[in-house]
Every structure is written in C-alpha cells, then in structure tokens.
Image: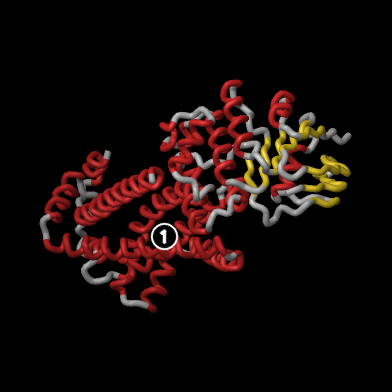
C-alpha cells in the first residue's frame, strides 16, 4: 500500500518509498549521531518513566493510608491527565533546561496513569478480604504485600502498558518542540527543516522499535517478578 | 468466655431479620445455631465478628477478643499458595503444623505449595478451616464450615475442629441436624421473622 502510494505521489520529499525509508534506517544505524541521539532520548524518557513509577507507588501508599491525602492527590492527578503535552512543554521550557525536557514530560504524562491504575487496583480489593485482614490482625506491611497486591498487580500491569506507550510519544513530541541538543527530537526537526522525509521515517521507525522492544522487555521482567512473587 | 445477647434487633431496610433475639452462648462449649434460610444466622455471626452493626439490644463485645472465623464464603487469596494463605493469617504456624493439619482434614501435603486457584471448593473449605484453627482464637465463629464437603471429608473435618476447640467458646451455624448433634453441646433454633 505504502509502496503504491509513494509511486502515485512520485515525490520522495512528500512520501518516500518503504525501500528509501529502510535504506535511511540502516544508514542511520551505523552513524555516530544515531547512538548519541537514541541514547540521549532513551535515557531521558526512561528516567522520567521510572521516576513516575516510583512516585506513583509512594503516592498510592500515602493515599491508601490517608483519606485526606487521597482527596488532595487524586483530583490533582486526574486533572493533570487531561493537560495537553504542549502546555507542559512550554511551562517546562520556562522552568528547566531543555535537556531535561523529555524526562520531565515523560514523568508528568506517566504519573497520573500509573497512580490512577494502581489506586484502582488497591480499591478493587473485596471488602470481605479487608474485613478478614482486620479480623486476623494482619500487620500493615503484610496486608499491603499479600492482601492488596494480588488485586493491584493486574491494574498495575495494564497501567504500565499504557504508560510505556505514552512516555515515548509524549517524550519525543516534547523534544520536537523544545529541540534539546543531541536528541531524537532534534533529528526529527532537522529531517523536517532539510526536507529529508526518508530520515523522518527512519527516525520514526527507530522510536517505534525502541518503544516496542522496551515495552516487551519491561513487561517480561514484570511478568517474571509477578511469578516470583506468587511462588515465594 | 460467655457471650450474652439480649433483645438483639437487626433490619435491612424494611426487612426485619432479627427481632428481640436473646441467647447465652456458654463459655467453653459449642453452640450450634440452626434455622431455616433467611432467619438471621449469618447476620448474627456478622454482628458477633464485628463486621455488621446492630440496631438494638445488647451483645457482649468481642472487639478485643481474638476470633477465629470461618466465613460462609472462603476468604482465601487465589494467587497465593496454601502455605502463604495460612501463614498470612497465622504467622506463628510452622510448615510442620500446616502439614499435620492438612493430613488431619484429609488433604495431602502436596497441596502445601499449590495455588488456591488450583484447588476444588471442598479443598478451599478445608484450608479456611485450617486457617481458623491455627489462628487459635479465644472464640470460634463457624458459618456452615462443612458446606460442600463429602461425607468422608466431613467426618475428618468435624473431628479436627472438635479436637482443636475443646474448652473454647464456639458458635457454629449449620443446617445439618446430624452435624449439630455430633459437635454441639447446645443447639438453638432461630425463627424467621415474618
């Protein structure tokens, strides 16, 4: 389909053929800028993702033990979920250096998703199980690990899956607006400025591949950890 | 400990489930509570275990009393193993205690590290009973503990409970007259409110 369309359009600038895009992709793989740009972006986006992962766990623990904290945190993060990426990018560019932009954007985009999913999982614990935990005087840490966690895990996993897709999209979009030096976003910007559309496709392919690979790897590790947790 | 109930009343909306119910559950004895479905037996147990508020009357408070409860529906965590479920509720129970208890109720030691989700209803029921017994409460509240068990396993379970609750106050809800006669020191009948 893509090949047919590119033949019909007939202009590489508007729509390069899949072959051109693949050629650019493989050429790109062996350049120094590929490693530096991909390394920069992957590092920033993943640091934002993992920081959000940690923060969401801490915030869910706080919300679970304090109703007041929950009434403050939940509406704030729910509202945060609806804020467009562009608004955050502009604010972030005022507040911080553009080199931390994708980490920050990845963090703010992922945090509400993980928090809301994890909290929903904890809240899905049947009231009978909570009653049982109370009656059998199960200690708070044990209660969190062995009573709430089995119900929270499926929600957490689906939250991670959504968040992983989101962090790459939002992170690269932020880099495209903020153009931090040495980032994938900057390379995408150059492709647009110099009309190197095949490079644009090649970089997009790079982002897709990294995002899919990381998602598979992360979910695999999460699955292993879940199995380990169930066997202990 | 003796549990005294005086003029207990409990309604759910217009449905008056328990009306002016009075009874004494003697210290150290097993009292079986019988009666047709909907007469308030489970409601009575829920009031005693503290998970349900009552509307009127007086009930000996069991708030700070260690209660071993077998609920009508098993409250086990499906994704955990038998070992973890038991250890979660009874921290002090050692592997050998659990293995011994499994044998007593007619279960093989092989199920120790089996996930609850892989067990049958009758097996889950027996694990719930083991949890309640190993928790070693001061008061035992049983809501149809032998529900779903075949005759052979039922006999094992009844003996297991009876041998391990000697001298404790036990309130045992059942529909089975033979069971009540076998384990009960006292049998009471609750009447359905009209």
Q: Quadrant of the C terminus of chain B?
A: top right
Residue B183: image location, x then y, percent: 69, 31
Q: Residue at x 78, y 52 (%)?
A: B60
Residue B63: image location, x then y, percent: 70, 55
Horizontal placement of A136 versus B36: left or right?
Answer: left
Parent chain of label 1:
A
| Residue closest to the eye, A15 or B27 | B27
Is residue A127 shown to the viewer in this render?
no
Q: Residue at x 38, y 46 (%)?
A: A232
Is residue A216 shown to the viewer in this render?
yes
| Residue closest to the eye, A93 or B135 | B135
Coloration of the structure image? secondary structure
Disc 1 marks which residue?
Answer: A110
Name the outermost residue toward the top: B151
Q: Residue at x 83, y 52 (%)?
A: B58
Residue B53: image location, x then y, percent: 76, 51
Residue B144: image location, x then y, percent: 67, 33
Horizontal placement of A89 versus B3: left or right?
Answer: left
């Amino acid at each position: 389909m893509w090949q047919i369309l590119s033949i019909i359009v007939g202009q590489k600038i508007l729509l390069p053929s899949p072959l051109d895009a693949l050629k650019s992709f493989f050429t790109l793989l062996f350049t120094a800028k590929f490693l530096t740009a991909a390394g920069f972006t992957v590092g920033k986006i993943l640091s934002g993702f993992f920081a959000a992962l940690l923060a969401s766990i801490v915030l869910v623990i706080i919300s679970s033990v304090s109703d007041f904290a929950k009434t403050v945190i939940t509406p704030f993060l729910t509202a945060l979920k609806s804020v467009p990426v562009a608004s955050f990018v502009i604010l972030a560019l005022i507040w911080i250096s553009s080199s931390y932009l994708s980490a920050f954007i990845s963090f703010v985009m992922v945090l509400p998703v993980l928090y809301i999913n994890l909290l929903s999982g904890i809240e899905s614990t049947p009231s009978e199980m909570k009653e049982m935990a109370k009656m059998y005087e199960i200690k708070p840490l044990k209660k969190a690990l062995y009573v709430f966690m089995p119900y929270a895990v499926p929600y957490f996993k689906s939250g991670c899956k959504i968040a992983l897709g989101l962090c790459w999209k939002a992170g690269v979009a932020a880099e495209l607006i903020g153009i931090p030096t040495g980032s994938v976003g900057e390379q995408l910007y150059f492709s647009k400025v110099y009309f190197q559309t095949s490079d644009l496709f090649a970089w997009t392919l790079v982002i897709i591949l990294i995002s899919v690979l990381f998602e598979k790897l992360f979910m695999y590790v999460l699955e292993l950890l879940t199995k380990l947790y169930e066997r202990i | 400990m003796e549990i005294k109930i005086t003029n207990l009343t409990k309604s759910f909306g217009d449905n008056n489930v328990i009306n002016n119910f009075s009874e004494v559950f003697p210290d150290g004895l097993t009292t079986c509570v019988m009666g047709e479905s909907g007469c308030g037996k489970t409601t009575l147990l829920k009031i005693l275990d503290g998970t349900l508020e009552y509307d009127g009357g007086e009930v000996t408070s069991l708030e700070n009393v260690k209660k071993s409860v077998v609920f009508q529906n098993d409250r086990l965590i499906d994704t955990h193993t038998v070992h973890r479920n038991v250890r979660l509720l009874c921290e002090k129970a050692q592997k050998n205690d659990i293995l011994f208890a499994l044998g007593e109720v007619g279960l093989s030691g092989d199920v120790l590290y089996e996930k609850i989700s892989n067990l049958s209803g009758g097996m889950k029921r027996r694990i719930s009973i083991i949890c309640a017994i190993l928790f070693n409460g001061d008061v035992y509240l049983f809501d149809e503990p032998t529900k779903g068990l075949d005759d052979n396993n039922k006999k094992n379970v009844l003996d297991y409970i009876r041998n391990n609750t000697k001298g404790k106050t036990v309130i045992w809800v059942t529909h089975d007259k033979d069971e009540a006669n076998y384990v009960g020191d006292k049998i009471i009948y609750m009447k359905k409110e009209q």
